[in-house]
Amino acid sequence: MKRSTRTAWISVAVCCALALAILLMALLVYPRVGPGVLKRYWAVLAISLVLSALVGYLIAQLAQATVARDAQARETRLRSHLAEAGHELRTPLAVMAASFDNLRHAIRPGDTSAYTQLDGLQQEVKRMSALVADVLLLARLDVVRRPSNEWIALASKLEELAAEVRQLEPDRVIAVQAAPGLRVRMDPTMLREIIRNLLDNARKYAPGSPIDLRATVDNDMVLIQVGDHGPGMDEEDRILAFERHYRGSTSAGKPGSGLGLAIVQAAVSKHGGSVDLDSQPGRGTCVRVRVPMNQ
């Protein structure tokens, strides 16, 4: 039970106890007083009950306002800390990446061993940078109370994100289908992260497979689906896929932080939606995201 609710109920209970005490006094003194005096007791009892309800309501409103202010201040502080942490973590990684570029020019021509080692270090820095970005994004999602929602045309947004994948993999077939005029009210950054992570997973775990990207209406929800025709998942991987840092049996040798689906789930939950995954070995994978059409 929330602190504001507990406070309100305690206040109401105290006021009601006082009112009942007045009623008990009235019953005890009734044999010794006239009906006129008793009527005054009843009037006091009625006023006490009304005041108890009013006091409980006012205290609850005050407590809720205080809790809301505290939560907003806490969120602001956490956002500031995350921004500082992000800067402190990204800066040395950027310096390392620049240093590798300088080292590459300093290597003697023909020293293949040095080039190989340098390439390995650069890949590790890229992996660390991606991990830092995912961890910070997930942390921000954890502290955000209300997304900055706006109306988004899904057809153009899906095409935009599919075009980015086609630039990376010109031969990849991506079929985009969206109901004409379909719009959803979501945080643009979060929607982008949701779809981008799902597309990245399809690229990574279903190499060469066509990708299906669809958006339709399902009752009062918007249904976004990203599917592939890759190797699929076994039962254990499917159950644990949304766990943070979980790397499935098909992840060996593939880059990633194990946070992609966790980020998707966190972003979707901030919009009051749900996400589920359908996958079987040899039959591909389809992730379905449902969010309210109007939030």
Image (cartoon, helix red, strand yellow):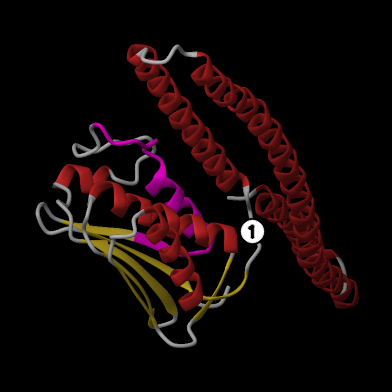
Q: Is residue 267 magenta?
A: yes
Residue 95 percent location from the top left of the image: 62, 23
> Would you identify the image quadrant in which residue 228 lies?
bottom left
Residue shown at 17% from the left, 49% from the top: 233
Quick check: 40 left or right of 155? right
Q: Is 276 in front, or is 212?
A: 212
Check disc 1: other Cα within 10 Å, few if <14, some if 14-19, many if 20+. Answer: few
Residue 123 percent location from the top left of the image: 41, 28
Residue 64 percent location from the top left of the image: 74, 55
Identify residue for label 1.
Answer: 146
**Three-letter residue code for mark 1:** Arg
Secondary structure beneath label 1: loop
Q: Is residue 94 magenta?
A: no
- Is residue 122 visible from the viewing direction of this image? yes
Above or below, 124 against 184 in this view is above
Q: What's the magenta region?
A: 253-275
Give the farthest residue toward the bottom.
Answer: 180
- State how many labels appear: 1
Residue shown at 51% from the left, 36% from the top: 135
Give the farthest residue toward the front.
Answer: 109
Residue 88 percent location from the top left of the image: 67, 26
Above or below, 231 against 101 in this view is below
- Is residue 269 visible from the viewing direction of this image? no
Q: Is 170 in front, or is 254?
A: 170
Quick check: 113 left or right of 23? left
Above or below, 126 against 66 in this view is above
Residue shown at 85% from the left, 74% from the top: 43
Above or below, 119 against 194 in this view is above
**Quadrant showing the C terminus:** bottom right
